[in-house]
Image: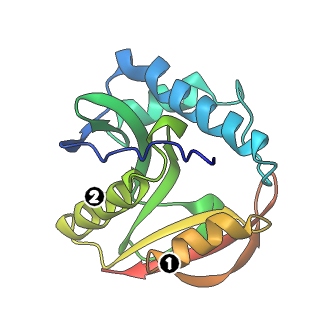
Amino acid sequence: MIVKPAQRSAPSEFKIVPAKPEDIDTVIGILDEAASWIIEQKLPSVWKPGGFSRETFLEQISRSEVHIGLADGKPAGTITLQWSDPVFWGEQQPDSGYVHKLAVRPAYARQKIGLKMLKWAEDASRNAGKGFLKLNCLAADRKIRDYYEQAGFLYKGDVVGPRAVASLYEKAL
């Protein structure tokens, strides 16, 4: 007899809140969990557990760029939303929001948490007067690229980033 694992139910409440300095361990913990899962799945990645800079995240938190997704009040994911990205996109018109470090705790996989966070970033960017939401991901990771394409993002090309070749994606708002 084959027993399938119980289907996880989606949270009854999901909201996104700005991260505060005291949330730094939660944010980095979510990213470390996601990085460990990626490694376990043998997917290509530049993310490594313990490889996320507290200093960088504290700076981004102070600029209100880092957010936490709460599923029924519990931290389930994180997303960083910025208004420029010269590293991957170069100098651009100020017409876009840029997503970075989107991660969902493995315990919340397959509950559409990532899509909810992307939708939030679309709404936040639109409300800030932006016309596009942009992101980059590892070009070698076909699984994550498919995920973004299924979420409505269009491939805009590849660039050589600081640690690997990145694929650029854009969605009109």
Task: Determine which quarter of the picture holds residue 40.
Answer: top right
Q: State the image coordinates of residue 155 (x, y, percent, origin top left).
A: 60, 83
Question: Which residue is depicted at the point 74% across and 72% down?
Answer: 159
Q: Which mark is residue 150?
A: 1
Q: State the image coordinates of residue 12 (x, y, percent, origin top left).
A: 19, 43
Q: State the image coordinates of residue 18 (x, y, percent, origin top left).
A: 28, 36
The residue carrying mark 2 is 120
Q: Which mark is residue 97?
A: none
Q: Is residue 119 above or below residue 154?
A: above
Q: Amino acid at mark 2?
A: Trp
Crowd tier of the residue under label 1, counting other residues whose Cα lies within 10 Å: few below 14, some 14–19, many 20 or above: few
Question: Which residue is depicted at the point 35% across and 75% down?
Answer: 95
Task: Determine which quarter of the picture holds residue 67.
Answer: top left
* Residue extending farthest front: 1
Residue 105 lies left or right of residue 44; in this view the side is left
Q: Earlier in the sequence, mark 1 or mark 2?
A: 2
Q: Amino acid at mark 1?
A: Gln
Q: CA distance from mark 1 to mark 2?
A: 17 Å
- SS class of the residue under badge 1? helix
- 91 and 33: which is toward the camera: 33
Crowd tier of the residue under label 2, counting other residues whose Cα lies within 10 Å: few below 14, some 14–19, many 20 or above: some
